[in-house]
Structure formats: structure tokens, C-alpha cells
């Protein structure tokens, strides 16, 4: 069958494929330790569920405005203001998750051939979205020595007359690294001088570990604020992955364009789900803190166990819930490593090649302590047999 050319330019999500294989093995009765899924293992907090149920019962079951429920847009603008970002409701569009927010942005901003600078390791959907929007991803590799962070001079060198956008993701998926305020300031200076856009993917902004702190690039002054777009959502901090509620914030003109695109593609986000999101923002933030503390505890345990395994190295993540592990000493590619580990030891991880780093694998520690302890034991046995 002849499909559109754009289809052949993108690859299906490897993370979803591996998670599916691990689930199939589990369904066959195999005892799988999974570190593959990029989602919190907690239930959505009760008061958020209750608000959605109440909305459903109150008849919030119809089409709403394409850009989102006005009360939710206001609540999001207020929470962004608390981060030092001067947005009103009209600067915000509610989208079908943070992923869709970025997709809308690429569609609204890019012309064919426009370049988007993406530091690697990157979240696997960034380059694919850019390609789907006919843009050109420009990948800038980083390594453990720089904490997997792009330096201002690397960014400067990657900028060309075709550069339209830079993608910043801090805290990062897959590395867990968090840029310091000074590092973000230095990047902001380059962005302002080059007069390009930056989109800050802040989906893990509420999940950082002391002393790291999330700083939003747009909060560093009026000049960089004018060049900033914010993408975020409820999935990670509030454990609402399946709800599909996220948002994009930026200049009114761009938000209007994204709303037009959304109005002809998905229309509004599920109406009663948006009421859950309102409750998430307006209610107590205690649930976010409880989950963060659980991740913090697991982070220490898994990092300690992992660092005892000869042949593997891993930096200390400062946010999100991933370990990005260097497997170079095994001599295996990341796909060989992850396939063999799953087949022979029933441990599911994600090959780094999906994130643009073939000598790494990603482990999510958004899972229980028992899985962490058993999984690390199996990983140690596996690596020992490959050194
Ligand atoms: C999970 C994730 C998102 C968006 O997730 P949604 O479920 O679409 O809200 C965006 N960026 C990164 C880096 C993520 O890990």
C-alpha cells in the first residue's frame, strides 16, 4: 500500500513497543521486572477523580471551547504566574497531553525546512514531531561529562539562518538532569541574541530532588519571556497519564493558531477530564509532594544498587524518575542489551538508541521497591555474564 511520504520519515515509539512486549510476557505468566514505562505507578489522587465524576454527573459531557474550559485556562495561567511567568488565560491552550501540546506547537510554528535544535539524549518524540511538521531536527549530542546538558557555545554553533526553535527539557527524560539557574540564564542569552524561539518542556518541573530546583527559562526576564513557549501537563506530577490533559502557553497569536489547528483536528480535550485538572490545580498540592518523596526514596535505593554493578556507570539524576545508564563496557548495542536482558532475565528497560544514545539504557524507577531490588539483582547477573 502506498502511504504518505511523511510516514516513512518517522519511526514507531520504541518505548511503547518494549512495554507491550514486557506486558505480553507477563500475560504468558512470566515474572517480569519492568523499568520500561515512563509513568508514575500511583493512582490518580482521589479528589481529582471525584471532581471528574462530579463533572460527569453534572452533565459536563458536551463539546467545549477548542482551547479549553475557561476556568482551567485561568487556573493554568495562575500556576504559571506562580513560577514567574506572566501569562493570562488567553495565553494558554489546553491540549490532549503534553505530547499534543508540542505537536500543536510544531504545526503552528514550522515551515518546511525550518530547523529545530534538540540536544541528545532527547525525549524520543521531539525529532519525530518536527519531521511530521516538515521541519528538520538538528541533533546536538551531549555526554556525561557535561551532565548531558547542552552548553551555550554548542547551542550557538548549531544556530543557522534556518533555526526556528530550541527544545529545552529540564528536568530531562531520559537523563533526569536539571539545568541550574546559571546554565539556563546562559542559554537564554544565546536565544535572545539569535532571536529564535525556545520551548521549555516542563512536564517534570514539580519532580526535582534537593538541592536541584526547577527554574523556568521564561522567568529570567522580559526579553527571554518574549521568546519562550511553555509545554507541560498533568500526567507526571499528578499521576494522570491516561487523562490526556496538557497545555501550551505563549504569545496570544501562537495560542490562537494552535487553537485553530486543534479546532480542526481533536477539538476540545475531554470535558470532564478538564474538571479533574482544575481540581488538581485548585486543590491541595500534598499529593504531588507525597509522590515526589516516594520517588526520592526509590532514587537513592536504585542508584545505590546500580552503582554496585561493575561495568555500568550512571550519573545521579536530579529530577524526573529515570536512571540513564552507560553500558559501553558490555560491548553491546543498546538494543542487543535490552533484548537479551528481557529475554534471558525478564527485566524490561529501554534502549538508549530511542533517545539518541546507543551506549545507554533507560530505567524508570516509578515502580515498587520489591521490583527495584529484584530487578537490580537480575541486572547484575546479566551484566556479569557480558563482561
Ligand atoms: C511524558 C512526557 C511528556 C508528555 O506526556 P503527556 O502524557 O502527553 O502529557 C512530554 N515530555 C516528556 C519529556 C515526557 O516524558
Image (cartoon, helix red, strand yellow):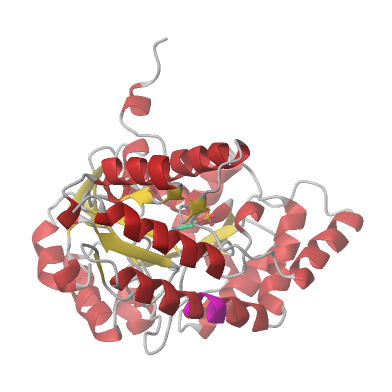
Q: Quadrant of the C terminus?
A: bottom left
Q: Where is residue 233 in the image (x, y as percent from the top left)?
A: 55, 63
Residue 225, above or below 331: below
Which corner quadrant of the image does residue 313 belong to?
bottom left
Q: Residue furthest top?
A: 1
| Numbered circles on residues, count | 0
Q: Does the magenta stretch include residue 45?
A: no
- The residue sitting at the bottom extreme is 211
Q: Decide if residue 112 is on the left or right side of residue 321.
A: left
Q: In this view, does 280 lie above or below 382?
A: below
Q: What stretch is highlighted in magenta?
A: 292-296
Determine the residue positioned at 62% across, 38% down: 27
> Where is residue 197 shown, x and y percent of the image?
30, 62
Residue 348 at what x, y percent from top left? 44, 49
- What residue appears at the point 68 percent right and 72 percent down from the top-left corner? 280
The secondary structure that dominates the magenta segment is helix
- Report the side of 383 relative to 268 (left or right): left
Residue at horizontal 39 percent and vertical 11 percent from the top: 2
Q: In which quarter of the image is residue 70?
A: bottom right
**Which quarter of the figure is the N terminus placed in?**
top left
Q: Nearer the viewer, residue 317 or 377?
A: 377
What x and y, as percent, mark residue 207?
48, 75
Specify whether 319 is left or right of 224. Answer: right
Query: Residue 264 occupies which quadrant of the picture?
Result: top right
Closer to the camera in the image, 213 or 321:
321
Residue 168 visible (yes or no): no
Residue 387 seen in the figure: yes
Question: Which of the pair 184/314 is nearer the observer?
Answer: 314
When the figure is inspected, residue 84 is found, relative to residue 26, above or below; the finding is: below
Residue at left 40%, top 57%? 378
Amino acid at each position: 500500500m502506498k502511504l504518505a511520504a511523511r510516514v516513512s520519515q518517522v519511526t514507531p515509539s520504541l518505548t511503547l513497543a518494549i512495554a507491550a512486549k514486557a506486558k505480553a510476557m507477563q500475560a504468558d505468566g512470566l515474572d517480569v521486572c519492568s523499568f520500561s514505562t515512563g509513568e508514575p505507578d500511583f493512582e490518580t489522587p482521589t479528589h481529582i477523580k471525584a471532581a471528574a465524576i462530579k463533572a460527569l454527573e453534572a452533565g459536563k459531557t458536551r463539546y467545549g471551547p477548542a482551547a479549553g474550559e475557561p476556568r482551567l485556562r485561568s487556573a493554568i495561567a495562575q500556576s504559571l504566574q506562580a513560577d514567574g511567568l506572566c501569562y493570562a488565560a488567553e495565553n494558554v491552550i489546553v491540549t490532549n497531553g503534553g505530547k499534543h501540546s508540542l505537536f500543536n506547537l510544531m504545526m503552528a510554528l514550522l515551515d518546511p525546512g525550518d530547523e529545530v535544535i534538540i540536544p541528545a539524549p532527547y525525549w524520543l518524540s521531539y525529532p519525530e514531531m518536527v519531521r511530521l511538521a516538515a521541519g528538520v531536527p538538528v541533533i546536538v549530542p551531549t555526554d556525561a561529562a557535561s551532565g548531558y546538558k547542552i552548553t551555550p557555545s554548542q547551542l550557538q554553533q548549531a544556530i543557522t539562518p534556518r533555526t526556528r526553535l530550541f527544545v529545552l527539557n529540564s528536568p530531562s527524560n531520559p537523563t533526569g538532569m536539571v539545568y541550574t539557574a546559571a546554565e539556563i540564564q546562559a542559554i537564554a542569552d544565546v536565544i535572545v541574541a539569535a532571536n529564535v524561539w525556545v520551548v521549555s518542556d516542563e512536564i517534570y518541573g514539580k519532580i526535582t530532588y534537593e538541592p536541584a530546583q526547577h527554574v523556568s527559562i521564561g522567568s529570567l526576564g522580559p526579553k527571554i519571556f518574549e521568546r519562550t513557549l511553555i509545554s507541560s501537563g498533568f500526567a507526571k506530577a499528578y499521576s494522570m497519564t491516561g487523562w490526556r490533559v496538557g497545555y501550551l502557553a505563549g504569545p496570544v497569536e501562537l495560542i490562537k493558531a494552535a487553537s485553530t489547528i486543534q479546532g480542526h483536528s481533536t477539538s476540545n480535550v475531554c470535558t470532564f477530564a478538564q474538571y479533574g485538572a482544575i481540581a488538581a490545580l485548585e486543590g491541595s498540592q500534598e499529593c504531588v509532594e507525597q509522590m515526589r518523596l516516594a520517588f526520592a526514596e526509590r532514587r537513592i535505593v536504585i542508584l545505590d544498587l546500580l552503582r554496585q554493578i561493575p561495568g555500568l556507570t550512571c550519573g545521579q539524576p536530579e529530577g524526573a524518575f529515570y536512571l540513564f545508564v552507560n553500558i559501553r563496557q558490555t560491548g553491546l548495542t543498546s538494543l542487543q542489551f535490552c533484548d537479551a536482558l528481557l529475554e534471558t532475565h525478564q527485566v524490561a528497560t529501554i534502549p538508549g538508541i530511542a533517545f539518541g544514545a546507543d551506549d545507554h539504557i533507560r530505567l524508570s524507577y516509578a515502580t515498587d521497591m520489591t521490583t527495584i531490588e529484584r530487578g537490580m539483582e537480575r541486572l547484575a547477573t546479566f551484566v556479569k555474564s557480558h563482561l
